[in-house]
Amino acid sequence: MQLLLSVRPGRGCTVLEVQGELDMATSPQLREALQGLINAGDRQVVVDLAGVRFMDSSALGALVVMFKAFGAGGGRLSLAAVQPAVHRVLTITSVDRVVDVYDSVRAAEADVLSSEGATGR
C-alpha cells in the first residue's frame, strides 16, 4: 500500500498527516518527512495517525529515533488519533509511556498550546 504524507499548520504546532501502512517499505518515507520538518525548523510536531491501520517494528523504530531527534533539538514529537491496532503496538512496546499519544489532533494541539503558555515559549 502506498504511504501518503501531508504537512499542514496546526494550532501551535505542525501536523504531519499519515495515511497507509507503516512498514519496512514505507518507514523510511516517514523518517525522511520528519527529518525534513526538523531541518525546516519545526519544533512542535504532531503526527496524525488516523489513516494508519498497521504499523510494524521498523516504523516504530523510525518514530522512536525521530522522537529522540526532536527532543535533542529542544522540540517535541507527539502522536494523535492512533487506531486500535497501532495503539496496541505502542502499548506492548511501552512506547506510549515515552511518546505522548492523544485521542485526537485537537487534544494534542491543546496540550502544545498549554505547554507553550506554561513555559513562556
Image (cartoon, rainbow, N blue to C red):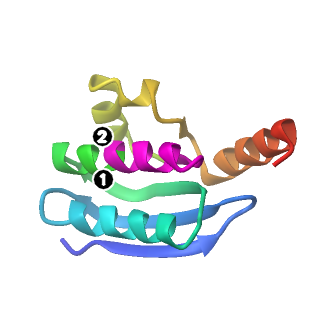
Residue 91 vs residue 1: left or right? right
Label 1 sits on residue: 53
| Snapshot quadrant of residue 11 | bottom right
- SS under mark 2: helix
Residue 111 shows in the view: yes
Q: Which mark is residue 24?
A: none
The image position of residue 54, as x and y in percent, is 25, 51
Extent of the magenta region: 64-78
Q: Residues within 10 Å of mark 2 (few under 14, many from 20)?
A: few
* Closer to us: 97 or 106: 97
* Closer to us: 7 or 117: 117
- Are circles 1 and 2 on residues that touch, CB within 8 Å? yes
In the displayed structure, would residue 18 be above or below residue 116? below
Residue 108 vs residue 26: left or right? right
The image position of residue 99, as x and y in percent, is 47, 35
Instruction: Tell me the residue at 17%/56% (across/down).
Output: 23
Instruction: Tell me the residue at 59%/64% (across/down).
Output: 42
Report the residue that reaches farthest toward the left: 24
* Closer to us: 13 or 54: 13
Image mark count: 2
* Residue 13 falls inside the magenta stretch: no
Instruction: Inspect the image, locate mark 2, and give the three-letter code of the amino acid beneath it.
Output: Ala
Label 2 sits on residue: 85
- SS under mark 1: strand
What is the chief secondary structure element of the magenta stretch? helix
* Closer to us: 33 or 80: 33
Residue 60 vs residue 97: left or right? left
The image position of residue 13, as x and y in percent, is 67, 59
> Which quadrant: the N terminus?
bottom left
Disc on the earlier residue, 1 or 2: 1
The CA distance from mark 1 to mark 2 is 6 Å
Instruction: Inspect the image, locate mark 1, and give the three-letter code of the amino acid beneath it.
Output: Arg
